[in-house]
Amino acid sequence: MTKSELKKILQIEVDKYASKGYDESCKLDDHFHYSSGSNNKGEPHFEFSKLEINKKYIHIMLAVHDNTFIKSIHPISWTFLVYKDGRIEK
């Protein structure tokens, strides 16, 4: 996969997790990995991490790579804030 393709896929995942809101995001595990398919080389592989949680917001990081060695060393990542009042900062 190209870097551009991975960025588009990451945008979709960021939108998906940002739409969950504060309360639902609090219930998610603090850190986990998942893939969007068979976990083969060339398939997107994701990492989710809660970087900070407080009474006002959750700071979340998502990263993606194509499960090849080189791109897994330097994944593309994106952080965003989900506020308790419903705001989202990407």
Image (tube, rainbow, N blue to C red):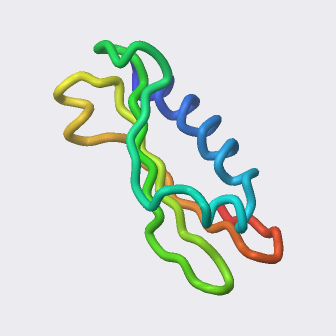
The tally of labels here is: 0
Horizontal and vertical percent position of residue 25: 64, 60
Q: Quadrant of residue 53?
A: bottom right
Residue positioned most to the bottom: 55
4, 70: nearer the viewer: 70
Q: Is 45 rendered above or below residue 74?
A: above
Residue at the location (68% across, 67% down)? 82
Q: Relative to the observer, which residue lies in front, 28 or 11?
A: 28
Residue placed at 65% from the left, 86% from the top? 55
The residue most toward the right is: 85
Where, quadrant-wise, is the N terminus in this rendering? top left
**Which residue shows up at 34% across the image and 14% down it?**
42
Q: Quadrant of the C terminus?
A: bottom right
Q: Is residue 52 left or right of residue 33?
A: right
The location of residue 5, given as percent across then percent down, is: 50, 23
What residue is at 43 percent from the left and 57 percent from the top? 49
Q: In this rendering, is residue 23 above or below 14?
A: below
Q: Is residue 68 left or right of residue 10?
A: left
